[in-house]
Amino acid sequence: MINKHKSKGISHRFQIRILAVYCILILLTFSGAIIAIRRVLLLRLDARIEQALEQEIQELQLLLDGKDPETAQPFGGNITAIFNVFLRRNIPISDEYTIALLPDGFYASEPSRLPSSIGANSRIVKHWQKLTLPERGEIGDSHDLIAYLAEPIRIDQEVKGVFVVAIATQNQLQEVDEAILIMIQVTAIAIAITSVLAWIFTGKILSPLRSLTKTARAISKNNLDQRIQVYGNDEVTQLSITFNEMLERLQSAFVNQQQFLSDVSHELKTPITIVQGHLDLMGDSLEEQEETKELIFDELERMNRLITDLSLLAKSEQPNFLQLEKVSLSTLTEEIYIKSQAIASRQWQLEAVGIGEILADRQRIVQAITNLAQNATKHTKPEDTIAIGSAINNNHFCLWVRDTGTGIAEEDRQRIFQRFQTVSKNHDEKSTGLGLSIVNAIAQAHRGKIELSSRLGKGSKFTIVLPLR
């Protein structure tokens, strides 16, 4: 229970860290975006104000070059008539003010009611009256900012008056701030919703990690059967698959180790018991001592052979069990044939020789076929035939040992490849029962297999089938 809560605690802390990083990134992204958007909106507002100021001045310039609609004659030097017509025709947009000034003072404005900062007796109006060149500027603070463009009116090279267009930006700035505030509120809601969704989805994503942690904590030397359920095809899934494969290897290695220890314990118990029994019963005569010594040496040789075979089977699970090299199949077959003839007196035949190069561990292949040949001698008589051959077929090559001996019963054909199993009626007391297990291990290490065909009273054929590459 403690481990379970600890596992959940670790997983939740990891989930919280992921969510915290996600929220920080989202906040930084949206904050940067809001700042950039506000800057763009302010730039566009400045552009609109500039355009509105220039447009009013341009319309005034057109009027100066035109005619008085009441008299259909040019305005001449009548500046007041120009101002009257312009102020009457042009209606300012919201927060826009047009002001007409004469050299001796304030003349008129539209609308007539002006903000106090640009009123008729304000300091800025008195400044505008004295202008001889166009002036673009701003007055007030950030909360009450007014942008203006003042244009002196020249007639016959003489300044007859000053025309001013002013725009109060307070309301427009307020609209920008309101838009930004709405964006912030929407962003906050979006972050809250996405954070909840992110918490849910990260929980699902991290679920295999929780399962991995739970499985890892449940593993012990007596319990290697735990596996993680695999869903999807993402990186976490690949991690789960790799973890399960690691457990398979660990379990296989542990089972092999246990099997090895069990086999050694079981098989060594008999010769040790025999040695102890004969030592206890050994008499004083020289003849009895020689018999006992001979039996002890025989049992010690059997134990040594047994340990060698078991060590070989244990090594067959290791990645460095094979030393692969390019080998000529014909040369290998002939070498095996020559060595096998020394095992026992039989009618030996070289049945077929495959031509071509293979990739294999030469010594292990020789060991496997020699074991099959030796096994064949145990089930044949001197007048029986034992044939050795090889061939290459498509992407595989095979080597076989065929005999005309007693054959193997159907019920024994699977069992004989297991450790310490022999055909009972042909049991050889000196056999460890590991020969065919070693042959099978060598074949599997080459990613191959053993095929057996046999008929009682007619003989057997063991074929090792291995890939060329």
Image: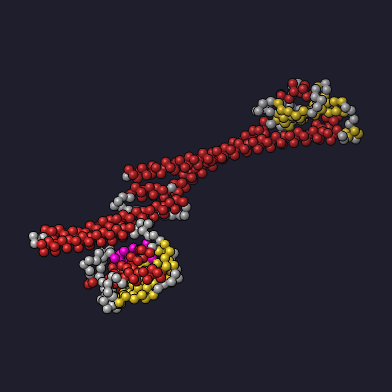
Is 369 left or right of 156, judged from the image as shown? left
**Residue for point 33% across, 58% down:** 315
- Depth check, front residue: 19 or 101: 19
Q: Residue at x 28, y 64 (%)?
A: 434
Instruction: Examine the rendering and report whether any part of residue 179 can be seen.
Output: no
Residue 110 position within the rendered picture, expressed as x and y whole percent measured from the top left: 77, 30
The magenta stretch spans residue 446: yes
| 36 versus 344 height, above or below | above
For the C terminus, the quadrant is: bottom left
Left or right, residue 402 beside residue 19: left
The x and y percentages for residue 273 are 16, 59
Query: Which stretch is magenta?
Result: 435-448
One can see residue 199 in this view: yes
Count the marks.
0
Q: Looking at the image, which residue sits at the far left?
A: 284
Q: Is residue 49 magenta?
A: no
Residue 342 lies, with reference to residue 257, above or below; the image says below
Nearer-the-camera pick, 232 or 341: 341
